[in-house]
Image (cartoon, rainbow, N blue to C red):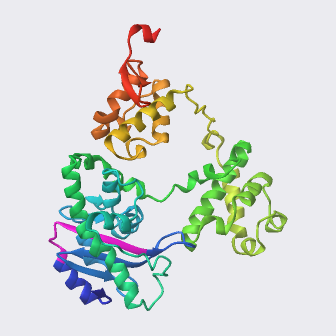
Amino acid sequence: MYITTQEQLASYSSQIENCQWLAIDTEFVREKSYYHHLGLIQVSGNGICAAIDPIAVKKLDCLLEVFKKKSVLKVFHAGKQDLEILNRLCGMAISPVFDTQVAASLLGWGSQISFAKVVQKTIGKKIYKTETYTDWCRRPLSPSQIEYAIDDVRYLAPVYEQLLEHLKKANRLEWLKDEFSPLEDGNNYELPDPQKQYMRIKNFRNLRPRNLAVLIELSSWRELEARKRDCHPRSIMRDEPLLEIARVLPKDCSAMESIRGLHQKEVTKSGEMILEAIERGKATPEDEIPKTPEIRNYSTQPGVEELLAAYVQMRAVELKIEATVLADRKLIHDTVLKFEQNEPLDGNCIFFGWRHELIGKTFLEILNGKKGLVVNGKGRVRLIPMNESTHA
């Protein structure tokens, strides 16, 4: 079903509003824009699949109200960008959600498994991604493009049901509880703080405090201007000329023209706004200029991370899942760093939920010298208790 009118959408929304769960996908374009440009919303519920055209149907409220319902589970595959779009449309974080890519990773099928591979492994159907580079915002869409888009939710429904069965057989349904929390957390979809964008610019630490205050205002202006124009911030001005403006503090537009990489068209269009940003930075009270963050020594004691990584790899083989699903190297590094600096480990996913039982307890035992790793006669790594002589 291809929905292009308000009446069709209202009728379809009423048919799915009492579903226990919905399979959802979106098609969008974002190569040159700040925001996602939504081309289609695909939904499957009560056995009825639809592709909703948000370009033809201007008011999506009746559909979005269904998405907002806490009683309706929303099922996606690799759904972070879909959720970013829908959360913005809904004006809130929608929940509960289920991500089939995350669920498949808990079965050992790979942390970044494609939808086509999940479909093949669960229902034995081979699908072909023939419209990967379609411009979903261009009209008209062909019947084959619409059918291709609908297939994503047509197959997502049985995939979801099959994954639940697989997880149940593997006694891993409980593992799901903690995995979808980040997808349901609205903080993960908020727009970046304009006043902190300067920290993404290379060599900002080389500036004096007053020049840094100017860079903060310039990078904040660029970020907000990109939102207005709906374009990438660096398409307005690259980092290098932005940094140079903050360094030399031009007094007028003609002085900007000598700055390499700053285009004349942008000076003509935005010169006055740039000068205003410079003045705001120069007027920032001394005590409000942020201190340049110290570069922390992020290194840990040699061999500790490698030891824990070997243990994670050992457990991953035993559990038949990817090691990164248990704990990737960044998580291991952050854990060791906090442990060595006597910082609390609260909030570290290794130490709560299913990971706590599988690796968390042993992590602490290894870090505290109570357990170690050896290679047995068959060349395999195994865990052993440490005795007093070993400690010595």
Image quadrant in which the N terminus is located: bottom left
Q: Is residue 197 left or right of residue 382?
A: right
In this picture, is 317 found above or below 88?
A: above
Query: Is 26 part of what is drawn in magenta?
Result: yes
Question: Does the stretch in magenta take in 54?
Answer: no
Q: Which of the pair 213/91 is nearer the observer?
A: 91
Nearer to us in this view, 247 or 145: 145
Residue stretch in magenta = 16-27
Which percent across, then down, holds residue 139? 45, 90
Asked which quadrant contains residue 355, the reply is top left
195 vs 301: above or below: below
Residue, far front: 378
Instruction: Examine the rendering and report whether any part of residue 301 can be seen.
Output: yes
Horizontally, is 113 left or right of 233 in the view?
left
In this rendering, the count of numbered labels is 0
Seen in the image, is 282 located left or right of residue 187? right
Q: Position of residue 58 (x, y in %)?
A: 36, 84
Q: Quadrant of residue 350?
A: top left
